[in-house]
Amino acid sequence: MSDLQSLSSLRPGQTATIHAVHTDTSGFHFRLNALGFRSGKPLLVIRIAPLNGPMHLRLGNTEVMLRQDDANMIEVLV
Amino acid sequence: MKRIALLGMPNAGKSTLFNRLSGASAKVANWPGVTVDLLSAKILLAGEMVNLVDLPGIYDLHGYSEDEQVVRHFLCNNSIDLIIIVANAAQIDRQLSLVLQLRALNLPAVLMLNMADEAKQLGITIDTDVLAKELGYPTKLLSAKYGQGYADALHQIEASLRGSTPTEIKHLEQEFSVDQEVESQLEKIISHSVEMPLQVSYTLTEKIDKVMLHPWLGLPLFFAIMYLMFQTVYTIGAPLQDGVAWLLEGFRDIALVPLLSALPPILNDFLIDGVFDGLATVASFVPVIIVFFLIMAIIEDSGYLSRAAFLMDALMSRMGLDGRSFVMLLMGFGCNVPALMGTRTMRSRGLRMLTMLVIPFSLCSARLQVFVFMTIALFEPAKAPMVLFSLYLMSFFIVFLTALLFKGKFHSSEPFALELPPYRLPTSRQMLLRGWHEISHFLYRATKFITIGVVLVWLLTHMPFGVEPASSASWSGWIGEFMSPILSPAGINPELTIALIFGFVAKEIVIGALAVIYGMEGEALMQGIAQQIDWVQAYSFMIFTLIYTPCLATIATIRAEAKSAWFTTLSLAWPMSLAWALSAGFYQTARYLGY
């Protein structure tokens, strides 16, 4: 049972697999790519910062923070 | 001379390797993208002097942010004999992409897989022979921080350097339509050479983060850490300052005074009450600064700064800034200049300008000296750290106020992602290097403009010849009188006015200038000031010092980074007006309330 949704809808503790990265700001996908956001890669939501702040994620051996607005552009398979 | 460039992703330990290779003290910071400006060192390798250049940490060669542009420009405009690529061994599956991009450019390189100790702990094994063969680059595992594997790595660098020829890239643009290819290569190479446990976990980091990034406790803990830091700086630094001041005073009375007694009085006065007292007063604060930077070094290297960015991002975004801006503000506590340069990791001009507008309000270590001086002189020891902390809070408050007022002018919608590296401890070697770096930085400044500033202040207070020093008949008296309608509403007297004028160049001169103006040093100087002004005036003076302008170097950096005369003018005019309004407001209110 798998289901496509945006990364920003995930809650802390949830894992998912990256399906696609739809960034509209030019060049930001390079940065995400270099940080390990590549389709097919698993990720874990560790926590979300207070006041609706950024998400704390783990991809492989890298931990990254990403704003929820930007996480919205990443499609994941839950 | 042959040229070697160090290149790698942020947080791969590139600066640590640079320090180990050069023995110099480039700054080490455990947060992505902090290495700014191009550090270089001349070192002896393979029997000849070579030029080693430390390039900014970059994620890839696409030139997304300004520091990536810097690297592109460097590669296109300089011939390079060898590139030392530094990658974090524990994140090889991700960082290899940069290596593959470089390989597509046919640059001569060696690959240094750093942080081998961490990778080993995490159960990651890398077959460097297979990796080297697949990449076509000599590859070594090492820990630049602790030194394992370093001798072997150095040997490899020397061997590669001997066989290399200078290479220059002409057309970087065309070389990068190969991303898809890079990705499939990457998967293949990793699967051949790296064994990684399915689930890697930094258990210690996870445990610490559970507390430090706790939804309720995170922010209070952050402020508690800051308070503890300044309390420590004060508790350790103040007695040290006292000790050094005592030693210098002794030197003056026992050696200098008898030695110079044969000189004509005016020259004697110039050398002892002018140059020596001024410099000695500034020098007595070096221990405070060293203690401060040692604690900063622990915090920076620990990886906590990016956690601070995580905690504060939501708040910062409401002010038109982001987590990086907050980290730069914290970096600014050391010195505003590198913090301003650190904004190069920002792509949106609006965000970068707004961050540069607020960084100068960050209470830097030079201003810290002035405040430690004033608080020791005018407040009880029990209250002094609180007074100091209140100035840090005010520094944040002014940042927030300025950002809120100007965010409409500097709009940005830059997406924001930042790596959160595992917690690390700096080695004592790194700490020592850092301490030494601060001392040499001070000596450099002391021999340049602090001496000149002190000499000028002496001249102003002693000219025309024969007047009573710093009296209303002296040049400094005239200037003080002239400025008095502006600054007396803030309770700032003519003596403090002269110090503020010179403080425009550098804040260290402020205390040196006060020593010269009052013709005293050490304990006597503090008592002299305490007799002349009360705590309300002192606090008003500190508010003004905090806000009006950090120093000439900061202004020059803003000008160079923003490349805009309009913006430079704004970043002079706004703080000046605000400094006056707040200190006058504080002074008048306090007086009205009867203090």
Image (tube, rainbow, N blue to C red):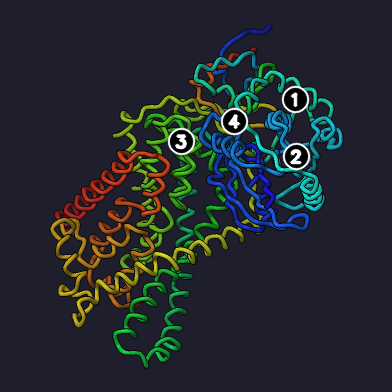
Q: Is residue B319 above or below residue B341?
A: above
Q: Is residue A12 left or right of residue B508?
A: right
- Which of discs 2 and 3 lies nearer the camera? The answer is 2
Residue B313 or residue B479, whichever sits in front: B479
Report crowding for label 3: few under 14, some 14 to 19, many 20 or more residues within 10 A (C-alpha). many
Query: Do we see residue B133 in this rendering?
Result: yes
Q: Nearer the viewer, mark 4 or mark 1?
A: 1
Do circles 4 and 1 both sit on a common chain?
A: no
Kindly identify the amino acid type of the residue bearing the numbered disc 2. Answer: Leu
Q: Position of residue B272 (x, y in %)?
A: 36, 81
> What chain does mark 2 sit on?
B
Residue at 32 percent across and 89 percent down: it is: B264
The residue shown at (51%, 30%) is A49
Secondary structure at badge 3 equals helix
Q: Residue under label 2, please give it.
A: B111
> The C terminus of chain A appears in which quarter of the rendering?
top right
- The chain letter under disc 3 is B
At label 1, the amino acid type is Leu
Q: CA distance from mark 4 to mark 1?
A: 21 Å
* Number of the label disc, if any, that sits on residue B312: 3
Mark 1 and mark 3: Cα distance apart in space: 35 Å
Residue labelled with disc 1? B186
